[in-house]
Image (cartoon, rainbow, N blue to C red):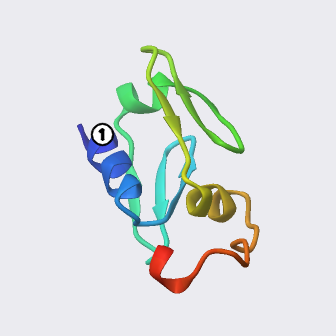
Amino acid sequence: MKLLVSMCLMLVGVTAQFTPTGIKHRDGTFTQFTPAEAANVVVIGTSGVVMHDGKNFQYTLEMAANHNSLPLPAFLSSSQR
């Protein structure tokens, strides 16, 4: 359930990074996965996360830039961040 809540927060614009054991938020907090949630993660890629249960999570442009430690593209205005 924590995984679902964290993924929903990422979708509404809260930028974070997936790790194998949880989600590191930009404000420095960390949402720890339960053992079942951690075991459900198959791969964390450059553009999203694949789960064993068939669910896939696609990063937004901002999330992908943050996850891959890249700057945001110049065409993104501050209103789109």
The crowding category of the residue bearing disc 1, from other C-alpha atoms within 10 Å (few below 14, some 14 to 19, many at least 20), is few
Q: Residue at x 47, y 24 (%)?
A: 39
The vertical placement of 57 against 22, above or below, is above
The vertical placement of 73 against 42, above or below, is below
**35 and 52: which one is in front?**
52
The vertical placement of 13 against 48, above or below, is below
Locate residue 17, reporting x and y percent. Answer: 55, 57
The vertical placement of 27 against 18, above or below, is below
Three-letter code for the amino acid on which mark 1 is drawn: Leu
Locate residue 36, reporting x and y percent. Answer: 36, 25
**21 and 76: which one is in front?**
76
Numbered disc total? 1
Check the image and name the residue furthest to the bottom: 78
Q: Assign a secondary structure to mark 1.
A: helix
Quarter occupied by residue 34: top left
**40 and 77: which one is in front?**
77
Image quadrant in which the N terminus is located: top left
Q: Residue at x 57, y 58 (%)?
A: 63
Tell me if 43 is positioned left or right of 74 in this view.
left
Locate residue 33, reporting x and y percent. Answer: 38, 42
Q: Which residue is mark 1?
A: 4
Check the image and name the residue furthest to the left: 1
Asked whether residue 47 appears in the rendered view, the answer is: yes
Q: Residue at x 39, y 50 (%)?
A: 32
Tell me if 69 is positioned left or right of 64 in this view.
right
Locate residue 9, reporting x and y percent. Answer: 32, 57
Asked whether residue 81 appears in the rendered view, the answer is: no
